[in-house]
Image (cartoon, coloured by chain):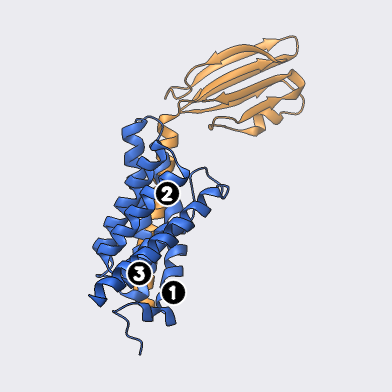
Chain colours: A blue, B orange
Amino acid sequence: MEKLTRKITLTGIFAALALAVFVIEAQLPPIAIPGVKLGLSNAVSLAAMIFISRKCAGVVTLIRITLGAVFCGTLMSFAFSAAGGILAFAVMAAVVEKIDRHQLWAVSVLGAIGHSIGQFLAAMIFIGTKGLLIYLPVMIICSVISGALTGLLVQRLWFSPLQKISKKSKLP
Amino acid sequence: MGKKNVIWVIIFTVIVAACLISIHIITNNTVKVSAEIYVSDQLVKRIDDISSSEKQTYKVSNEYGENVICWQNGSIWIESSNCKNQICVLHGKISSAGTSIICAPHKLAVTLVS
């Protein structure tokens, strides 16, 4: 029972954090190319994945996408961020336990690439492919950079006293 | 720790390189480049597609002088001109949309548009 309460609480905290980061990030002007952003809310999903569990990270992602669209988004942006967020989550959930924590940034990069591909698929469905193909490699390059940055951030958090939050912690 | 990081860096570098190559291929294939030739701001000739594999020639001659413009395989250049500075001839070949060759003495401009 205590374990469950702990999980629910942590999931709530991470969801609130992801949502706050998402809303703040949406207000920032785009870096270089329109639509390119750091993806810090994805970093929160990844953090939830390693600090709590994959299932709870999925819940955090879904809450962030839904409430994020409610607070600052349109139906279209909801579809895009859902496609990107869910695919990114799926990719990260698939690889996170297979890759060492010291290479956590690589998990984040793979997730970010998944995010780009998911958004591209959504764009293909809603807008059509013509002229959009050029954006996929551009988006993938950007996601390698942003994924590495946010991944390093989460990796740094894991190798810090904060690790104690996690049940899987090896710290005393 | 270091070795695995290096492997991942290599993997992602390959991915980025593949993306850069595909950007190059996509921009080269899908964008059809047309050329427009202007003499004193008047459009005198529009070449819809400069990608022909045979060398094509167009001669501009007017009161300012004579320029011979050639195009082949998506690039265009001024082969010869009887202007005094020859800057247009020395400019060489251009192939990407938005670039131009100017022959100032003859008031001539060759511009590529997509």
Dots 2 and 3: beta carbons under 8 Å? no
Pointer 2 or 3: first along the chain: 3
The picture places residue A41, in percent across and down from the top left corner, at 43, 58
Q: Which residue is mark 1?
A: A157
**Which residue is at 41% across, 53% downward?**
B17
The picture places residue A53, in percent across and down from the top left corner, at 27, 68
The picture places residue B86, in percent across and down from the top left corner, at 71, 28
Q: Nearer the viewer, mark 3 or mark 1?
A: 3
Gap between marks 2 and 3, in whole Å? Answer: 19 Å
Residue A10 is labelled as 3
- Residue at mark 2: chain: A
The amino acid marked with disc number 1 is: Leu
The picture places residue A166, in percent across and down from the top left corner, at 33, 77
Above or below: residue B114 compared with residue A30: above
Q: In this view of the protein, which residue sits in the foreground, B100 or A65?
A: A65
Pointer 1 local density, CA inside 10 Å: few below 14, some 14–19, many at least 20 = some
The amino acid marked with disc number 3 is: Leu
- Residue at mark 1: chain: A
Pointer 3 local density, CA inside 10 Å: few below 14, some 14–19, many at least 20 = some
Pointer 3 or 1: first along the chain: 3
The image quadrant that residue A75 belongs to is: top left
Residue A68 is labelled as 2
Give the secondary structure at mark 1.
helix
Give the secondary structure at mark 2.
helix
Q: Are marks 3 and 1 on the same chain?
A: yes
Gap between marks 3 and 1, in whole Å? Answer: 16 Å
Pointer 2 local density, CA inside 10 Å: few below 14, some 14–19, many at least 20 = many
Q: Are marks 2 and 3 on the same chain?
A: yes
- Residue at mark 3: chain: A
